[in-house]
Amino acid sequence: MHTSIGLTLGFIILYTSLIGHLRSSCWKDPTSKFFQPQRAYTPTYSAHRIQEAVQYADIAGVEQLEGANRTTPPELCIGIPSVRRDGISYLKSTLGSLQHGLSAEERASLRFVVLLAHTDPERHPDYGQPWLMNMADRLPSYHDDAEYLALARQMERNQSHGIKAKFDYSIVMEECEKTSAPYILVVEDDVVFLDGWRHRTIEALDTVTTKSWAAGHTDFLYLRLFYYEGLLGWNSESWLAYLGSSLAVAISVLCLLLLVRRCMPKARQYLTHPVFFLTILVFTPLLIILFFSAGGNCIMPQPEGVHLMTKNACCGQGLVFPRTTVTNELLPHFRSNRWSQVPTDSFIEEYAEETGGLRWALTPVVMQHVGGQSSHGVFRGTYGTMTPSHIWNFGFESNDAERLAAEHAKFNRQYS
């Protein structure tokens, strides 16, 4: 009896200590019972980066910044379709964060294509802004093509927002394809990129290419630069695997106790039937419950670097495609399914499932989704005007501005 009481008291102390540790460690995991939304949604780094981006764009509005050298193909083309949002625009901070901190050599290796996605582009609040004219290398319009203009007008009349979003996505991909850049990055217009995003992305693309070849693929579908951790925790469809693992743990503990009891006779006086009962039916289940309560991202975080992410990936805020994939696969698929009602990100995921295209993701992410106002006029904010209630990468806010700036400067010194 004394053994059982001592064991119970010791377990209570241990369990309480574990709860305290998890409360301090798992507060930014949305799949955790210890998740603290008010704290996790604080835009610690994003707010700093937005300020830098807007200041840079303001300078670009009054000074002619050094643009790209258009005589040579870029290594990466960035396409941004942008739609008017009631009362707010994020395009300035998006474009500013993409360009702030770039060296002249880095800027020359990029092309920026911005589509103001309205048949009357003057409806967009950023139309004609000096900073936009100076920062974008190409500002395509529906008026450049009579067929596209007619299609866009029809979609606007029908208020086919999802269909038109895919149409706009295909237009910026097509414009980027014309630059002959080997890679095309399409981003939403309500995101912010960290300082040094370019060199991290290029290094990741080199790794992805090597890994794709090693896997027997001549190319890949995309590299994801942003994802939402809330879909990467414990998933209900895997309940059977979780149950099997939990039973395996309980059986392993039981076997260990029996082995100790058999091999160590002196331990038998302590390994009584009440101790077995408490350990197997109380302590072990409580520890398993605590394990799952801590959250999948906290207990088993995504490994740093590039890795396959074929399930539970969200969303389409920033995807890098090889130009060959865009030319040979995606653009024909978009054109042949122009009137599909499936949202753009799901449309691409469905294509990946059909074709087996490799979907890679970069960890840590190099961008954040800061939009709280959707392009359809729906306010999504729960914790402020710049943070959405769902699509947010909590790890991004752990970035340190000084450390990132030092890393970026070191990279430029090495490759200058």
Image (cartoon, rainbow, N blue to C red):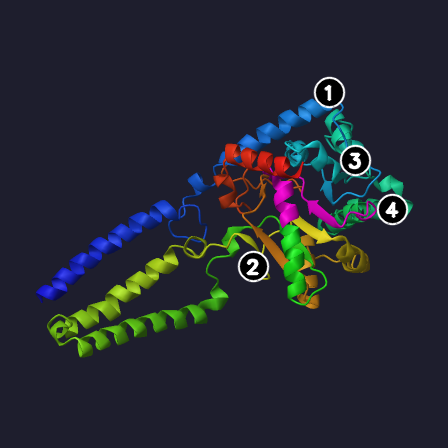
Q: CA distance from mark 1 to mark 4?
A: 36 Å
Check disc 4 and report the residue beneath it: 150
Q: Residue at x 77, y 34 (%)?
A: 68
What kind of residue is marked 4? Ala
Looking at the rendered structure, the secondary structure element under dot 1 is helix
Question: Which of the two residues, 243 or 150, is positioned nearer the viewer here?
Answer: 243
259 displayed left or right of 3:
right
Check disc 2 and report the residue beneath it: 312
- Residue farthest top in this picture: 62
Looking at the rendered structure, the secondary structure element under dot 2 is loop
- Which circle's residue, 2 or 4, is located before the other in the chain? 4
Q: Nearer the viewer, mark 1 or mark 4?
A: 1
325 displayed left or right of 50:
right
Check disc 1 and report the residue beneath it: 62
- Residue farthest bottom in this picture: 262
Check disc 3 and report the residue beneath it: 137
Q: CA distance from mark 1 to mark 2?
A: 44 Å
Q: CA distance from mark 3 to mark 2?
A: 35 Å
Q: Badge 3, how many Cα within 10 Å: few under 14, some, many 20+?
A: some
Q: CA distance from mark 4 to mark 3?
A: 25 Å
Q: Disc number at residue 177?
A: none
* x, y percent for residue 43: 50, 36
Span highlighted in magenta in the image:
177-203
- Which circle's residue, 4 or 3, is located before the other in the chain? 3
